[in-house]
Image (spheres, coloured by chain):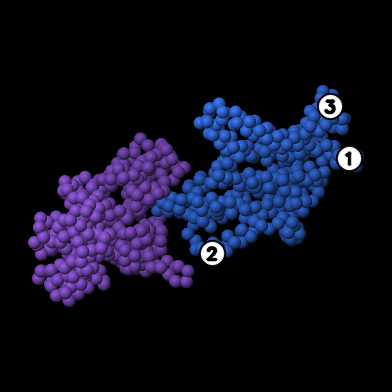
Chain colours: A blue, B purple
Amino acid sequence: MSNDARTDGGTVTEADPGASAGLLSGLDAYRVLLYLGLLGMLTFFLIPIESGLVTSFKTPSGVSGSLPFAPPTGGTFTFEKWRAAFDALGRGLINSALYAIPATVISALLGSFTAYGLTQSNWKQKYKAPVLALLVAGVFIPYQAVLVPLSQFWSMIPLQEWLGFLWALGINNDYASVIELIITHVAYGLPICTVLFRSYYKNMSEEMIEAARLDGASIRRIYRRIVLPLSGPMFAVVLIYQFTQIWNDLLFTLVLVQTESSAAAPIVLILAGLGTSLEGQDFALRMAGAFIAALPTLAVYIAFGEEFAEGVAT
Amino acid sequence: MGTLELDGVTKVFPDGDGEVVAVDDVDIEMRDGEFLVVVGPSGCGKSTTLRMVAGLETISSGEIRLAGQRVNDVKPQHRDIAMVFQSYALYPHMTVEGNMAFGLEESTELSDEEIETRVADAAETMGIAELLDRKPADLSGGQRQRVALGRAIVRDPEVFLMDEPLSNLDAKLRSEMRTELQRLQDELDVTTMYVTHDQTEAMTMGDRIAILNAGELQQVATPLECYHEPANRFVAGFIGDPSMNFFPVERDDETLVADVFDYPLSAPTLDDVGAVTDLTLGVRPEDIALAGDSSGEHTFSTVVEVVEPMGDENTVYLRFADAPEGETFIATVGGLQQVSAGDEITVEIPEETIHLFDGVSGEAVHNREIDE
């Protein structure tokens, strides 16, 4: 998007001073080509999404009887698939939110704390350096490499016993896996969150922090009153990034929740099997399900979009 | 009472395998209410000294005493000092009022009303009362500077520390703020340590000047003492603009012999010099006078290389008649004196205006006479 804006802006400034007739005709041809090119790319990228959207509103006969990107006509139009998808995915939406939101918030907060300690505090460099090295290494550990150790680890933790009071309240004990997912995602997201916050805090004025120290603020007070309020843009970046990662992650849910029949099954697990049966694929249902599953990430992008752009730019 | 004493203060930074001495055994005593300007070229350790007083740097050895109490191990937030930074270091997300109240909220038990009153008073003093609701981003450079000062004075600390507070301002605003700061200092009478590399600020603002070079304290004295009675060649060259002219000379009995001129000395001056033979002759540009004829003992014929007219005076680059081209020294003459490049003129370097420095150590052995 920023690319578009820049290309556009560039041509405008070039065109304005050279408004004589001869130059204008040359620029017009260039512009026509440019816009055609942009339109072509727009179509190319939007066609799959458009196809998915129109397909989700089609009856089975509509899906088989028309081109994928053709809109549904009177007889083949139906909300039925969206209703069915929502019925199937509803509990998954709630389950996913149950771990994705806490894990995102906790990992962002802990990342911010850690990065603050690694940059603006006056701890000795020789203590900071190894911690940072470990965190950077943590960013590069592939998900696949930790799957077996992860399931081993959680099988050793008697989480079911510790949470006995919850099951006594009538909560399905499948929900232990929600706790497991929260802790796993926080641990796995902490390194990248810390590294992102660290680069942001490194650029923060050191004199400003020193001024706060001389003003009598302790290291905790400086974080709460100066650093945290100024971290908004980076929180937007980290929240969007982490939420998308955690919401869309299938690997950890496969290992920790395992089946869609679990009461705590997240939306990604249910979506994987949605609309698939021995009789074949129900494309309309799968499309509707995909859109429902993607809506929360879209909402997060829209909610933090402005701060996100500011945070990425710094 | 806000006395501040630095006793043998030393700062050593590790540098690879070795170490760098940034501040070397500095002794300074400031009395209550004194305005001391610490001045020196960049990298001389003046900011490090200030930061040690603030508690932002640890002290390698020596002792800093604030109001008689040793503060080496006291955290910056407990030292009761306020500092004004070069970058102003305002909190960008707070209003001017928030910026000024922050220190009181963090370091005192004052009630909200009391804080509000004190902030309003300080804002009144600084002339920023109508800006209290604005954010720093909406202020001009001069206004931010005032807020930074206001944030310091509202705390009513024992000591103010200022780290080149005027260097981000344009020339006109800088001289305005210089006057403003002097007025404030007179009014508040708080002990102030002011770091700058600008010798004009040092000369005009300070009760006393401390001159640092390469981490070592060169001289602590009033501005005029530093100007007329420099302790060594470095101070003589650093204070004054254009700076003092230096000529390496050899003493041969009663005469100073340079490559291109001889300078006879009188008995009192010779007494000061003693047995030293390797000397540096120093003379301030304004002490070099145009002479009508070359009959005097201390007159020399010179060639004018460049004239820089400043309006009130001309800065003239002169060369001894026998000296190679480019080897010039500076004299300032009245703005109405007609001097132009290429002229041959005779100048006098009066003996009562000369300074003599030890050629090896740079220590002053003889300073100019001052009419009392």
**Identity, as a three-letter code, of the amino acid under mark 1:** Gly
Side of B34 where A151 appears, left or right? right
- The crowd level at tag 3 (other Cα within 10 Å; few <14, some 14-19, many 20+) is some
Q: Residue at x 14, y 75 (%)?
A: B253
Q: Earlier in the sequence, mark 3 or mark 2?
A: 3
Q: Classify mark 2: helix, strand or loop.
A: helix
Q: CA distance from mark 3 to mark 2?
A: 66 Å
Specify whether disc 3 shares its chain with disc 1: yes
Camera-side residue of B328 and B36: B328
Q: Which residue corresponds to mark 3?
A: A76
Q: Earlier in the sequence, mark 1 or mark 2?
A: 2
Chain of the residue under the numbered disc 3 shown in the image: A
Side of B10 where A147 appears, left or right? right
**Identity, as a three-letter code, of the amino acid under mark 3:** Thr
**Identity, as a three-letter code, of the amino acid under mark 2:** Tyr
Q: Which residue corresponds to mark 1?
A: A280
